[in-house]
Amino acid sequence: MPTLSIIVTAYNVAPYIGACLESVRNQTLEDIEIIVVDDGSTDGTAEIIAEQARADARIRPIRFEENTPGGVGPAANAGIAAATGDFLGFADGDDLYDPQMFATLHAAAVAHDADLAMCRYQLLDEADGTLREPDEGPYWLPYREVTAFQLDTERRSELLRFIAVPWRKIYRRDLVERTGLRFPEGDFFFEDNPVHWAAILGAKRVVLVPEWLCQHRVGRPGQTMDTADHRLPQIFRHHDIIRDLLIEAGVEEAHRRDLLLWTATQLAWVSARADDDVRRALYDILVPILAQYPNGEVRAFCAAAAPFGTAPMLLALRDEDFDAFDRAAGAMKARSTRRADAPAHSGGTSLLAVGLYHLRHSGLRRTARLTLQYAAGRLRGGAGPGRDEGETMVSQKDVMMALVVLQREMRALRGEVAALRAELARQEADDDEDVAEEKGAGRE
């Protein structure tokens, strides 16, 4: 039985599959099996996989004669069924993996007796070869070193907000078998989301490894993430799958707000990409979803926590007002287009913005704990306090220590506040412009 089974899924990725498999074969963790599932490719992918298998006996190819409907679900599940390792990991056939990645994750999982180990990743732009971080950088700020903890409701809520991708994680076989972990199969996409929720809900202990250990290719032709057609709204088919997972685990009430936050976050992403003719389908699939939440709950969420300017869309959906939803979604896409065309700026993630985010979504006690972890890391050169939840107690002395460290940041924070105020003023001006345009259109 190998230490780790790495399941590589591939479909029409002939230009990339060779480099992907080379990066997997060159892992410093050598006791692995590499299960490569080709989902009916027609571009020569299967031949490249066969050539790699002849060069490395650890590769076990599985080939589907025809491409399966929907996304990666059937291929990934075939890999899970064939896997024999103590741990399971995943790889996309067009991505690249650091030679140390799986050894690092495995060592962390074993050392901390974790069901699940997770690292950071970067986005590799196919157009120009540049690397950038996905939009989860603030979530990693409290974890500047390898950190393990038992999962409770609060920790699960925190991890459920991370991007759902499976190929920067490894899963202990016991977790996979105990939860019956499988990808949804059907005529839809973005199956990573229910798998992420199932794993976080089922895991007892998790370890986070704050290293960028894989590169996820974006911007290539045919990639699901780049689609802007009728498939975009299909991500919301996973809402009820996730809801059923919560009900089955007996934690629906505990994570109901997390699921609403997931819905709003996906809505922001989809509406920024959806063309005009997709909005009706988006509206039709979301109205029955929002109807599952009482009107007062939706309005309270919109007032306190709706992210990325999604409140007008959520309220329109709850009120079943397509015209209002169409206007709000159009404004969201227009703002997204303007920002995409604006010059890039640097400077990293604002500490103030991160603090405001956690105050809004995690509450005062959790924010105090994260502040303590951050402050201890600054004072001790990255060595944080106890790694387990129970070892980190927030006292008045701790808060004072945090304030001492944060005081050192004040000069930089003043500049960040000025920049944030300028950005808010620009956004308000953009919103006023959108409203004026809408009123003008109404008069016509």
Image (cartoon, rainbow, N blue to C red):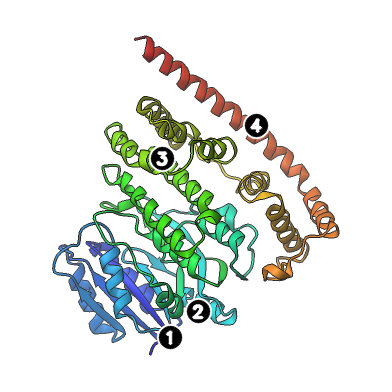
Task: Say what secondary structure mark 1 lies in.
Answer: loop
Q: Which residue is mark 3?
A: 291
- Sort mark 4 into few (<14), some (14-19) or many (20+) by Cα contacts within 10 Å: few
Mark 2 touches mark 1? (CB < 8 Å): yes
Task: Say what secondary structure mark 4 lies in.
Answer: helix
Residue at 37% from the left image edge and 14% from the top image edge: 441
Instruction: Kindly indicate the quadrant of the structure image that contains residue 89.
Output: bottom left
Front disc: 1 or 4:
1
**Amino acid type at mark 3:** Ala
Which label number is shown at residue 106? 2
Mark 4 touches mark 2? (CB < 8 Å): no
**Amino acid type at mark 2:** His
The correct choice, above or below, for 138 with respect to 49 in the image is above
Residue at 32% from the left image edge and 34% from the top image edge: 279
How many angstroms separate mark 4 from mark 2 (CA)? 44 Å
User: Is 246 placed left or right of 393 in the picture?
Assistant: left
The correct choice, above or below, for 267 with respect to 12 in the image is above
Front disc: 3 or 1:
3
Task: Say what secondary structure mark 3 lies in.
Answer: loop
Q: Which residue is mark 4?
A: 421
Which label number is shown at residue 3? 1
**Amino acid type at mark 4:** Arg
Mark 3 touches mark 1? (CB < 8 Å): no
